Image: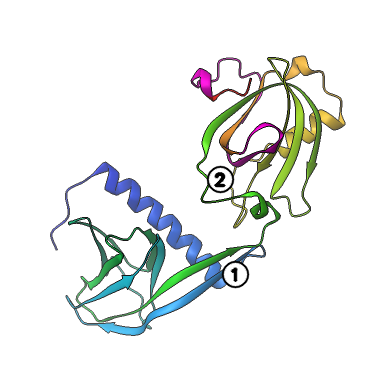
Amino acid sequence: MNELPFDSKAFAEHILILIGMRLLLLLCCMGIGYAKVTHVPIKSGGVLKPNEAYTVNLDASEPTEIGWLAVQAKPCTMNCVQVTEFRDGGTHSIATKMGSSQKYRPTNGKISVEYRNISTEPVTIDVFRIERTCDAEACRFIDEAQKARTLVFLVDEFQSITTSKDGSYSVISGTVMSGRRFRIKAVWWTEEKTQFMVNCAPFVQGFVDNHTPKEKFRPYVIAGQAIGEGNNVVLKSVSSCAPKASHYGASPDQFFK
């Protein structure tokens, strides 16, 4: 089998797909208390002979997440299914041995994805649409249709913090270095808690409860993607929490002043 030339962008997308695959398998096996994940079958138990392909042609008006899993009794020992997306006159391929999931953007109202057996043994696959329903308390504040912007808070003093029962968001108030008061909803997670999420809540709660002198942490940076204005700002994703970050890199218009 000929190997594709190395491409850094494709490699990064490969890693993201594999991460998505791992999460997909965890969802299948364990379930997540705050996210409902439904698999809507497109093709179940499809047997692909070596070099045989199955193509999904799906009518879609918006990006749609599609996944696949190898379900034959004998697992693949190497990458056995190559997934190729046909979009905007081009193609993008990735090969895995267990399964993967990805959100595909339609072209002219159509999503076209090919699943090809690139191994020497038959492979049985399930292909399905993935529908996710977020039940976290934080989901009430997130409007996916609203365009987000980068917003950085250089906090001089924290006055209060209240965290939701499920821990998915906190309401934080205080004063930034310019002297302006702020009150924000900071979302820590939506579909699931992961080891990679940024969550400032324990630190801020400690500062407030212990009346920590602000000289020990200011300016404390809370940065992320924001929607809303004034006291209705929601950081729908938080990318950074750091004390004594006076040299935090951002353009002037990205700071809350």
Horizontal placement of 116 versus 106: left or right? left
Horizontal placement of 119 versus 111: left or right? left
Image point (70%, 55%), residue name: 137
Can you say which quadrant of the picture contains the N terminus? bottom left
Q: Is residue 136 above or below residue 48?
A: above
Horizontal placement of 94 versus 187: left or right? left
In the rendered structure, which amino acid carries the disc numbered 2? Phe
- The residue at which mark 2 appears reads as 196
- x, y (%) of residue 36? 60, 68
- What residue occupies the far left of the structure in this picture? 2
The answer to if 247 sits in the magenta stretch is yes
Near mark 2 (Cα within 10 A), the count class, few <14, some 14-19 or many ≥20, is few
Horizontal placement of 253 versus 183: left or right? left
Label 1 or label 2, whichever comes before in sequence order: 1
Image point (57%, 30%), residue name: 151
In the rendered structure, which amino acid carries the disc numbered 1? Met
Near mark 1 (Cα within 10 A), the count class, few <14, some 14-19 or many ≥20, is few
Q: Which mark is residue 141?
A: none
- x, y (%) of residue 97? 33, 67
